[in-house]
Structures are given as C-alpha cells and as structure tokens.
Amino acid sequence: MIGSLYCIHWDWKNCLTRWQGGFSGRSRKPIVVLKTVALYDTWIWHVFFGVPGSQNDITVLGRSPIFNRLTEGKTPQLDYYINNRQYNMGYYLADNIYTKWATLVQAIPNPRNDAEKLFTLHQEAYQKDVERVFGILQARWNIISEPARGWSRENLDSIMMSCIILHNMIVEDEQDEYIDEESDDDQEDPNRSRRVRAKIYDGPNLPFNLRTSSICINEYMRRYKMICSCATNKYLQQDLVAHLWAKRSME
C-alpha cells in the first residue's frame, strides 16, 4: 500500500468573472480542486492542484499524472504476494466514488461477514490519514482555512505549494529517527536524524525504443489496461480480506 488518495475542494472567493463558469461545481461557487496522496504520518508526497471545480474526483484522477510513470514503465519493479497470489503494482486506498482499478482499493460498502467488516474497518481508518491532512494544513495556516482571495491560479498554486512544503518540513522534523536495518550501526553518525540510505531499484524489463527512450504503443496500451483492470481490483480486495482475517485469527 503506497498511500491514501483524496481530493479537496478549496473555495475561490476572488475568482475572475470570465473563469467562474469553468471553476463552478455543484455548489455553484468557484472551486479549485486539490488531489493529494499522503502516508499514515500525514507526509504528502504527491500533489495535483489547480483543476477547475467543475470536474469531479474521477475526472481529476484521470487528468493527474499519478499513473503516468507506471504506464510508461519507468517505476520500480514490484513483485509481492497476497494470499498466495502474485501482484506487480502498488495500490492506493481510496473512496468508493473512484473507479475499480487495479491500483485502487476501496472499502466494501455492505460487508456480509466478519472478515469483510474487519477489512472495511481498517481501510476506512487508514483512509482517514489523508482526510485529516487538509485539516492540519488549515489549522497551521489560516490563509487556506478561508476561501481563496488570490486573483490568479499562479498565486493560488504558490500559496498551496508553500503550505504543503512547510508541512512536510515540520513532519520530517518531528518524526522519529529512520534507521536502516541493513546499515552498520557502528559506522553511522549518531547525530544524524535521518539514516535512510538511497537505494537504486531496477525497473521492469520492457522493450524501450533507443531513439525515443520510450516503450512501444502496444506495450503502453497493455500497461494502461492492466492499471484499469476491474478484475484485478476484485482479486486484490478479496486477497486483502483473506490475508487480514488470517492474520487476525493467528493473534
């Protein structure tokens, strides 16, 4: 699980008249959409901001570049097993409003047994991590706790990005030390607050065009269909339910 995905709608009070039609959503008020991916410690590592408010969360996800590198075959190679089934793509926790893709895992709307109830309870609990990120941002910076008063999208982007960067700096400063289990403790500097070493991961072994440094269109479409697979989403959710219930039974 890479992180939790969530979309936030920020009211734009001083939106120019010629832009209000494109930025007005269901509330008939100008809105700017912010899509974030955050971890359990509220660290924000992916942001897609500035989308007109007339678009819903699904179209915002389609426009965002979050799956671009995965489709292009430029992400690290992943191979792991859940309930004796092999998977090669990471996944995000999301609301039920999103499409059933292989890279998204939603809660079960109507759990029918104890195993599904346990999975839904854990999924919704971890999903709250990203939902409270914007609440933390609003509590720390009053400028984004109220409707935006900027006159241009560039100013709003600078404000939001600055607040997010400062938020990540605070989270990194306040979190516990990172300890690399593969490193030698005798060789580490005890005064360093961050001990994680950078590692180089191998990407998937795909046929790249030497001239364009990209994969062929057939491979691109194959990987795109693999990401949008509803069947993989179903199997992944079922395996996670079985794995979590088996782990609970062993405790």
Image (cartoon, helix red, strand yellow):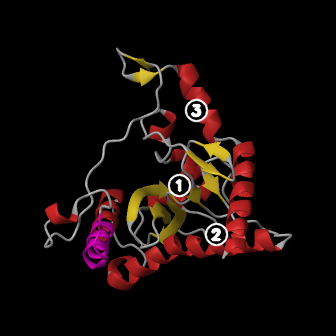
| Vertical placement of residue 217 versus 115, above or below | above
Q: Is residue 84 left or right of residue 14?
A: right
Q: Is 85 drawn above or below residue 71 in the view shown?
A: below
Mark with earlier residue (1, 3): 1
- Badge nearest the viewer, 1 or 3: 3
| Residue toward you, 169 or 181 | 181
Please tell me how crowded label 2 is: few (under 14), some (14-19), or many (20+) other residues with Cα within 10 Å.
some
Residue at far right of view? 112
Task: Check whether the beta carbons of the residues at disc 3 and disc 2 lie within 8 A of each other.
Answer: no
From the viewer's perspective, tell me whether residue 131 is left or right of residue 124: left
Q: Residues within 10 Å of mark 3 (few under 14, many from 20)?
A: some
**Gap in angstroms between the C-alphas marked 3 and 2:** 26 Å
Disc 3 target residue: 223
The residue at which mark 1 appears reads as: 22
Q: CA distance from mark 1 to mark 3?
A: 32 Å
Position of 27 compared to 11: left or right? right
